[in-house]
Amino acid sequence: MINYREVSLWKDVKPKEWNDWHWQLANRITDIDTLSQVIALTPEEKKALNDDLLELRMAITPYYATLMDPNDINCPIRMQAVPTSAERDTAEEDFHDPLAEDRYAPVPGFVHRYPDRGILLVTDQCSMYCRFCTRRRFAGEIDRPKSREEMQAAIDYIEKTEALRDILITGGDPLTIEDNNLEWLLRSLRRIPHVEIIRIGTRVPAVMPQRITGTRVPAVMPQRITRSLVSMLRQFHPLWINVHFNHPKEITPYSTRALNMLADAGIPLGNQSVLLRGINDCPYIFKELFHKLLVNRVRPYYIYQCDLSRGISHFRTSVGKGIEIIEALRGHTTGMAVPTFVIDAPGGGGKIPVMPNYVLAQGERRIVLRNFEGTITVYTEPENAGSHCHGCKEICMRQSVSSGGGVSELLEGSRLQLEPQELKREERRHQWMEEKAQPQNTPDAQRPIPAGKDK
Ligand code: SF4
């Protein structure tokens, strides 16, 4: 991290301005000339920046820019922030909307994919546009928050959908919205009795921690300091925040202070990282990052395999790399530092955990396991291992109503099978049924279905 006063561009900026998130947002680096004053750009980077074909705009907070190595094109911070022409490449497997969020949006700005929770997209603005962003189809499109009127339709949908008990506020970055609008949104959600949990997903502590650490003096009432963001947030517990750090270089005295302020406000913190080629695809980088996060009371929650969004294939690693990282963490450090490695299923199937295989064999009563050292061991199950759950009928009834179905229904015996919607044999069966329903006036129509055709 360099001292911002050493950069000629900011040599006259006062600490009060530097620590003001409005100043950071208003002075984001968005053009090649300004960026050239902070880092030495390569011809390739200049070409990409001159290129109008970039789907995702560039915007880098001055704070995040001071974390970049001015002379190293492989700097992991710079690679997350500065566009390259590789973003113009489209791989065959790329999608515009890999997680099919638009398909599962009952109203604009709300994604309802899981049974009891939903995603509220409140802005397309971010303080820094990450070059690997999975929502690049709309992130930064207009670079501003939604109005209250635009958010109201989603709030109405949440209100009338009683199954929704957990709402994730995201975007864009919801912490780029002004306090009064964020407070209005949180209050609107808290008024809904079935919304038990509110979560905020944000990259602000990593890229613009001043949003959390700074206090603001409104121009109309200079004599009164507004409450800090954390004082406002703590009114809406249970409120959880998922932050987004990808590299240990993002943990600085500024981000540390921001995380500690959130934790001191009683907000449980989790971290979501994206596995990125050339940036963090190494077990030691993740181990150091996760140790630093735990010291700051942030629990590593997910590592995401990079999604199949268009223009980010150069950031993708093999899935094996993620499994290798988990292998290097589990048992080698505290379980608190081991997140779940997931692939967010293309097409909207949700997060699928992927991990090393610890079960080597399974018999009638014995399960053979291996640990992180390679020690092979056996666990013997009880003779009568059947579950004898009594006395929880009320809970069972309540929970089964909101169940999302799936494989767990096969395990509890309430279903015999799960079938894909588009089975060829089902298509044939429907066709036969339709044919049978037709007036049967030709001799051919009387013929029985040939044996074997019902398979
Ligand atoms: S902060 Fe999140 S939504 Fe914004 S650009 Fe980065 S990854 Fe995308």
Image (spheres, grey):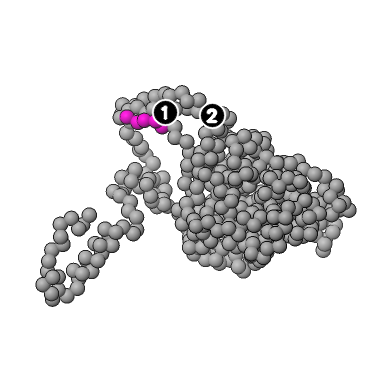
Q: Is residue 345 visible?
A: yes
Query: In x, y percent, where is residue 383?
Result: 31, 26
Label of residue 369 in the image: 1
Pointer 1 residue Cβ closer than 8 Å to ligand 1: no
Quadrant that contains the N terminus: top right
Q: Are marks 2 and 1 in contact (CB under 8 Å)?
A: no
Q: Which residues are magenta?
A: 359-363
Residue, x 38% and y 50% (percent of image)? 406
What residue did someone put label 2 on? 331
Mark-to-mark CA distance, 2 and 1: 14 Å
Say which element carries label 1.
strand
Is residue 86 placed above or below 72 in the rendered structure?
below
Quadrant that contains the C terminus: bottom left
Magenta segment, principal secondary structure?
strand
Residue nearest the viewer, comparing 181 with 234: 181
Query: In x, y percent, where is residue 190?
Result: 59, 56
Q: Is residue 254 left or right of residue 190?
A: right
Q: Write down the quadrant of residue 2 in the picture.
A: top right
Residue, x 34% and y 55% (percent of image)? 420
Amino acid on which the number 2 mark rests in the picture: Gly
